[in-house]
Amino acid sequence: MGAYVAEVALRWSDMDAFGHVNHARTITLLEEARADLLFTEAEKQGLLGMAEGMVVARIVIDYHAPLMYAAKSLQVRMSVRELKTASFVIDYTAYAQEAVCTAETLMVPYDLRAGRPRRLTTEERGFLSVWRAEQLETGRA
């Protein structure tokens, strides 16, 4: 299927003193897009476990252009790679007229009751595999 696309609204409070979206807010916007995929879309497909425990183990972000508040929204295209037994990577390309950033997060399913990482279920792996892509279209290697 390729990339999952989420549209995230920009808020006035996302803007910094220079008139563009603050870097920490950009990460929050990516988080909102990721939640749309892993929680909202997964729940629509009957998967509730992802919302019960999923943690970010690592995040990397590269900025390509300033994200201006005037854009009003950010289109975030996400795909999954390195789908392993107990982790996976989500790749992002965020657009506001042009690609403003690319990012990746290493995600780990987590058992909140036991207080430790867990393995992905067969159903979760099936859901994530739908969004697998070798590379997004931004030239990211």
Image: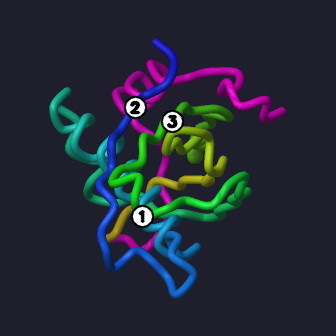
For discs 1 and 2, the disc positioned in front in the rendered view: 1
Which residue is identified by label 1? 69
For discs 3 and 1, the disc positioned in front in the rendered view: 1
122 drawn magenta: yes
State the image coordinates of residue 97 (x, y, percent, origin top left): 51, 39
Magenta residues, start to end: 113-141
Amino acid found under the numbered disc labelled 1 = Tyr
86 drawn magenta: no
Q: Front-most of 68 and 90? A: 68
Which residue is identified by label 2? 5
- The quadrant in which the C terminus is found is top right
**Marks 3 & 2, CB-CB < 8 Å contact:** yes
Q: Which comes before the other along the chain, label 1 or label 2?
A: 2
Element type where label 3 sits in the image: strand
Element type where label 2 sits in the image: strand
State the image coordinates of residue 1 (x, y, percent, origin top left): 46, 12
